[in-house]
Amino acid sequence: MSDQKAIQERTLAELGATAPDAISARFAELRSGFDHRVDLLSAGDLAGWTALRNAWLGRASGVITAIGDNWLKPATPEQKRIVGKALNELKAHVERTLEELRALAEAAGDAGTTSAGGVDLSLPGVQRPLGTRHPLRQTIEELERIFLSIGFSVVEGPEIETPYYNFEALNIPEHHPARDTMDTFYLSLPSRAAATASEALPPRAATAGSNKQMASPELLLRTHTSPMQIHTMERQKPPVRIIVPGRCYRRDNPDSTHSFAFHQIEGLAVDTDITFCEFKGTCEYFVREFLGPKTRTRLRPSYFPFTEPSAEVDASCFACDGRGCRICKHAGWIELFGAGMVDPAVYGYVNYDAKRLSGFAFGMGVERMAMMRYGINDIQLFYQNDVRFLRQFE
Ligand code: PHE
């Protein structure tokens, strides 16, 4: 614009443009001024584009508004028709041109971000990396579903235990070699806190149990979910049919199959008429539900201090159907979990009548079941919370 007052700031009368031709000439002058500014604008100059739009279309002081105020309003009725029409045309031209420029800048992509303070509206938004329900949680829920369907209920128990519940009441006395495989973390709490914590635990077995032991002030992180066998039988009369999902701890060094914290699901069924037959039938039902109807079950003799007889429950390999492959290390069978008939000595700790009652128990590693089922070869993947791993379990 020149140093004298811009033409849109003066009236048509002041400009001496009252005849239709003169009016049209003034509009043509404005239009070519605008086109000139557009030519000077470089592609993607967002700041320049914004300034141009404000100068022409700004509501308070834009050129279009000024012409409405200074040219249109004071005009005579005949002039108004000409001015109104020309103004509409000019406004449409300015709007259309600015819109085209904006679309061009957007299409130019990166070019749109180059100028100072430029924002490229065509870039994708920020996506938060969402995971999924954790595969361990999904596995626990699947295991729960299977046992709930045959009358078991789900209970949970404390991760902090006394040696009595974790070992002694499960028929594992202090110097028993079975403790070596279950080294754990002992807690040294300030003495008052420790006293409160052990008071909070349920009372010891009544005197009728000849196996009753003295309480130990020590606290530890449970090495298995089996202590909940004892807690449950202390609290409730038979029949008992429970499963216990939960976190356990062992002083193991981390590698692809070991972790200092992991998960188990315990099972316990005690009643007046439970035989080895029910035990085996339950195992077979579980294996077929979890791994498919064609899977076969095998019981192998084993040893646990709190079950007698004890067994390792194996399933025919789901990958090769028992023919032998890398997954089952050419054995045709995969070891699933430890189990057995409850050792009558355990009933002595919970004041159950060992002559009248019988039952079975099992304890399975949740990680192991999930790894086998999904073909995961490193237990550490469960704990790293990498969404690239988690998203495979949608
Ligand atoms: N608690 C045993 C373990 O962690 C598993 C088990 C549970 C075995 C119940 C038999 C019965 O190794």
Image (tube, helix red, strand yellow):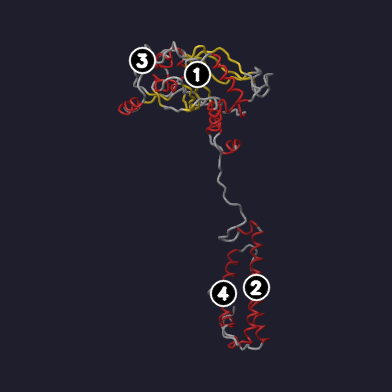
Q: Which mark is residue 62?
A: 4
Kindly identify the amino acid type of the residue bearing the numbered disc 4. Gly
Badge 4: residue crowd in 10 Å (few <14, some 14–19, many ≥20): some
Badge 3: residue crowd in 10 Å (few <14, some 14–19, many ≥20): some
Q: Under tag 4, what secondary structure?
A: loop
At which x and y percent is residue 161?
A: 40, 24
Badge 1: residue crowd in 10 Å (few <14, some 14–19, many ≥20): many
Furthest toward the left, the residue is: 192
Who comes first in sequence, dot 2 or dot 3?
2
Q: Nearer the viewer, mark 1 or mark 4?
A: 1
Who comes first in sequence, dot 3 or dot 1?
3
Residue at image mark 1: 361
Disc 1 under 8 Å from ligand 1? The reply is yes
Kindly identify the amino acid type of the residue bearing the numbered disc 2. Ala
Do the residues under discs 2 and 3 have CB atoms within 8 angstroms? no
| 355 vs 62: above or below | above
Who comes first in sequence, dot 4 or dot 3?
4
Who comes first in sequence, dot 1 or dot 4?
4
Residue at image mark 3: 213
Residue at image mark 2: 92
Taking the spot 58% from the left edge, 58% from the top edge, the residue there is 119
Marks 2/3: CA distance? 95 Å
Marks 1/4: CA distance? 85 Å
Badge 2: residue crowd in 10 Å (few <14, some 14–19, many ≥20): few
Kindly identify the amino acid type of the residue bearing the numbered disc 1. Ala
| 22 vs 96: above or below | below
In depth, the one of 232 and 213 nearer the eye is: 232
Kindly identify the amino acid type of the residue bearing the numbered disc 3. Gln
Q: Under tag 1, what secondary structure?
A: strand
User: In which quarter of the view is residue 92 placed?
Assistant: bottom right
